């Protein structure tokens, strides 16, 4: 066996690997003469190869045992590839329209072979920076989140099934610990990895570290992140984990997947849309002030939550007499009571989502890993202005999330704060 133990592949050894792997070779019609292989991994953690031949194509993603953008000084479990593959299959089962199909998984090599999302698919974040509107984005993302989160929760499963799944994903503890560090800890203390647009945001970063109410709020969210195994969450559902065209939306990269609070996924997506909104002034120019586009982002954000809520509740209605054990039909046995329970559940989930979304925004401005939406604004003082507005909004939202009843209230506040 040429690949009996782990080794990072390059283009040459990858070709050999594909030839030895029937599940992959068959996708190419067993033709290898005209193969084009390109490494395209622009993320922080993995090597990603696009493999295209005359008879077929796929993507190969290999996890390496350290953080790629920092180097071997920051080790990182390659077992994450296993959890990514399991999550892709599970999420793909519940929402096949919005998750790329997995063709092959090799645990020894920490390697996944999956559908190549061919052009014109691009990373959503890049589309948002370019000012492209995606008319189906809210519809598709709300569908993905409603289906994957509902179907992996106790609203759908028995506690026995749920515990088994939770136990399996507890193995992804290293990735969870990374999130605990970079989202819930580092931004609130002095940390060697933190950075921000200095000197402009020096006082703002310090204000985050000195804000007692903010620290009380983040502790609450950290505890929920660590303790609440509500559903299988993607774990990193930002706009860099979504690929889009005008009529296709595909969610990729669930290597941080675990059983956690649903609001962590919903919040990550909404928070990244808000970051995109606040970055737009930095991308405006003579030809395009981006005002119309900013409005589209806010409408999309509002629509995403509202559609998510509708879809989630209608899945709940559809399965209220099913095998889910959270609310037993013998107890929740009339429509008035069921509506009360649903309203309470969705209100709590809304507040969780706002809190986690705010936490994700803060960490992208004063933590270790930033977002291209803001980083690509070349004028540092203009960038800092955008970041300050986003940071002030996020700090307020994290502390006061429970004051909001509707997403429209949050959106109109964003509109005003810019």
Image (tube, helix red, strand yellow):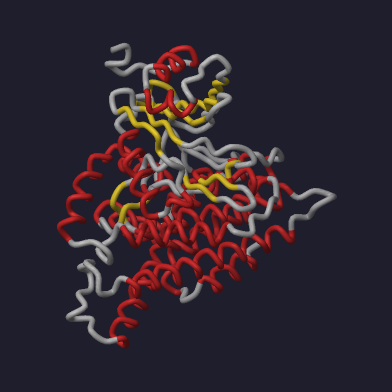
Q: Nearer the viewer, residue 31 or 361?
A: 31
Looking at the image, which residue is at 22% across and 50% down? 166
- Residue occupying the far front of the picture: 29
Residue 66 % position (x, y): 37, 25
Image coordinates of residue 62 in percent, x first then y, are: 41, 27
24 vs 175, nearest the viewer = 24
Q: Residue at x 62, y 66 (%)?
A: 299
* Farthest-out residue, right: 286
Between residues 217 and 351, which one lies in front from this camera angle? 351
- Residue at 35 percent across and 44 percent down: it is 89
Task: Give the total of numbered labels.
Answer: 0
Give residue 203's position: percent from left, percent from top: 55, 48
Identified at 34% across, 27% down, the residue is 110
Q: Would you identify the image quadrant in which residue 398 lies? A: bottom left
Relative side of 396 to 256, left or right: right
Instruction: Pinpoint residue 128: horizontal percent, then vertical percent.
Output: 64, 49
Q: Is residue 53 left or right of residue 87?
A: right
> The C terminus lies in which quarter of the figure?
bottom right
């Amino acid at each position: 066996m040429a690949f009996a133990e782990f080794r990072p592949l390059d283009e040459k050894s990858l070709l050999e690997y594909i030839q030895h792997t029937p599940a992959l070779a068959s996708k190419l019609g067993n033709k290898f003469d005209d193969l084009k292989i390109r490494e395209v991994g622009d993320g922080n953690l993995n090597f990603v190869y696009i493999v295209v031949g005359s008879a077929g194509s796929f993507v190969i993603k290999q996890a390496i045992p350290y953080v790629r953008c920092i180097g071997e000084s920051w080790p990182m479990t390659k077992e994450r590839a296993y959890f990514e593959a399991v999550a892709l299959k599970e999420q793909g089962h519940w929402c096949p329209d919005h998750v790329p199909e997995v063709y092959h998984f090799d645990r020894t090599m920490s390697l996944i072979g999956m559908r190549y999302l061919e052009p014109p698919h691009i990373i959503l974040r890049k589309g948002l920076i370019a000012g492209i509107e995606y008319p189906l984005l809210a519809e598709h993302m709300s569908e993905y989140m409603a289906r994957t989160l509902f179907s992996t929760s106790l609203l759908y499963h028995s506690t026995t099934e749920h515990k088994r799944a939770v136990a399996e994903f507890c193995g992804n503890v290293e990735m969870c610990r990374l999130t605990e560090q970079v989202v819930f800890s580092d931004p609130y203390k002095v940390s060697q990895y933190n950075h921000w647009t200095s000197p402009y945001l020096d006082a703002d970063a310090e204000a985050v570290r000195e804000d007692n109410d903010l620290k009380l709020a983040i502790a609450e969210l950290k505890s929920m992140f660590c303790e609440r195994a509500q559903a299988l969450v993607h774990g990193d559902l930002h706009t860099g984990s979504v690929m889009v065209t005008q009529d296709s939306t595909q969610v990729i990269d669930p290597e941080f997947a675990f059983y956690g609070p649903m609001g962590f996924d919903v919040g990550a997506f909404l928070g990244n849309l808000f970051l995109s909104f606040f970055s737009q002034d930095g991308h405006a120019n003579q030809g395009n002030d981006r005002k119309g586009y900013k409005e589209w982002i806010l409408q999309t954000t509002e629509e995403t939550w509202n559609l998510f809520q509708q879809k989630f509740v209608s899945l709940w209605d559809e399965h209220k007499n099913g095998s889910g054990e959270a609310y037993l039909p013998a107890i929740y046995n009339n429509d008035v009571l069921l509506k009360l329970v649903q309203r309470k559940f969705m209100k709590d989930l809304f507040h969780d989502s706002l809190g986690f979304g705010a936490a994700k925004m803060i960490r992208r401005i004063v933590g270790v890993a930033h977002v291209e939406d803001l980083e690509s604004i070349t004028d540092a003082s203009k960038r800092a202005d955008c970041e300050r507005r986003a940071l002030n909004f996020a700090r307020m939202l994290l502390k006061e999330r429970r004051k909001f009843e509707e997403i429209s209230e949050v959106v109109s506040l964003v509109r005003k704060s810019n």
